[in-house]
Amino acid sequence: MTTPARQLRDEVLEACRALGFALAGTCRARPSDWRGAINAWLAEGSFATMDWLEATMPVRLDIDRFLPGARSVVMVADQYGAPMDDGDETGPGSSPSGRIARYARGRDYHKIVNRRLHRLADALRRLFPQDSFRCFVDAAPVLEREHALRAGLGWIGRHTLLIHPQRGSYFVLAGLATTLDLGDSGDPQAAANHCGTCTRCIDACPTGAIGSGGVDARRCISYLTIEHDGPIDAALQPRMDRWLLGCDVCQEVCPFNAPDSRDTESSVARPVASHPAYRPAFPAPGGSGGGALPLLELLDWTAADRATRLTSSAVKRATLDMLKRNALIALGNSPGAAESSDIVRRVREVADDEHEAAMVRQTAREVLARFEGRRRA
């Protein structure tokens, strides 16, 4: 016999699916089980310059501090990519382009998810005016992945991202905390760790950022291109490929995003559709693929160009100076760039331009030094 609480939970989850979320689940609101591991990660300094992580950790570790009296957490996942997505974003054009992580290729996920989550919260407030509801999408001090694990949306891989056995890992996570008692909807099969002995994400990480203790942000390309606002270690730059913003390497090699793999349980995976709002907004050279920006063109951007081109994009998380720094590094890693007189000349112009930020000029000089070393080799 279905209890009123179970019926309410089922209705809430059905409402989540009706709003277009790929996955939805509920779990009881309780303090984190990861306190020890997280404190060790902080003690090692692996959070790099993200001081806000350390400052907000007491709230992250206890959802009751986020919403006093919280009894349940509703977790949702929005699919921005799909298993078997080949990620072709360069096209046949000859002009070097910088790669953008799949989650940032379409419209800004914060707005896409927030709008629908608040619709759900508003509907629940009308039904339960005596209860409280608070939404969170990425920027809020909540450990989304732990709650998603508890809610049965998947398990946490070695790269620290959520993986679902059929849908892979191309998700953004969000949810709402509430004083309603919705209980647990956990799916033990989905939440069971299926990584086994696989270490593909660790082995493939270009900068060696993934280890047994999680991800060291100081070496992570996503952190370096999105969060780090200073110069990037010249020794790391050659390993960053052409990533302009973010990095998908650890997900691209994951068997659960490559269902044709024969040596893992990922054979159960199947192609699934991503939410239409995440369709690439940046066409590739030649008009094929998506999710790339011309690097030489970006070096000419003004603040107004950035604002116009990135109006509805999550790429605007990076400042103009950061994007130019990233573009220079990507140019330095582009095939044939050292032999291109046009590219070398443009990088030298940036290095000599007193109007450019010191970080941008420094990066340009480091790229020129690599070009010179490549020509001598």
Image: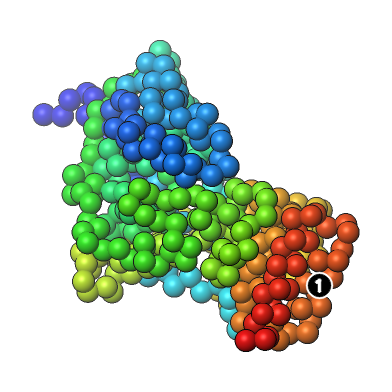
Q: Is residue 342 left or right of residue 258?
A: right
Residue 181 horizontal/vertical position (percent): 29, 22
Give the residue displayed 36% in from the left and 66% down from the top: 203
Question: What kind of residue is marked 1?
Answer: Arg
Residue 97 in the figure: left or right of residue 221: right
> What's the residue at 66%, 62% (across, down)?
326
Read off the residue under disc 1. 348
Q: Residue furthest right?
A: 354
- Badge 1 local density, few (<14 within 10 Å), some, or many (20+)? some
| In the depicted structure, whether residue 89 falls above or below residue 36 | below
Whether residue 281 appears in this view of the structure is no
Residue 65's x, y, as percent? 43, 20
Q: The N terminus lies in which quarter of the figure?
A: top left
Residue at 40% in and 67% down: 204
Tell me: residue 222, above or below residue 178: below
Q: Is residue 14 positioned above or below 314 on the image? A: above
Rendered view: 163 above or below 239 = above
Residue 86 image position (x, y, % from top left): 44, 72
Q: Nearer the viewer, residue 106 or 325?
A: 325
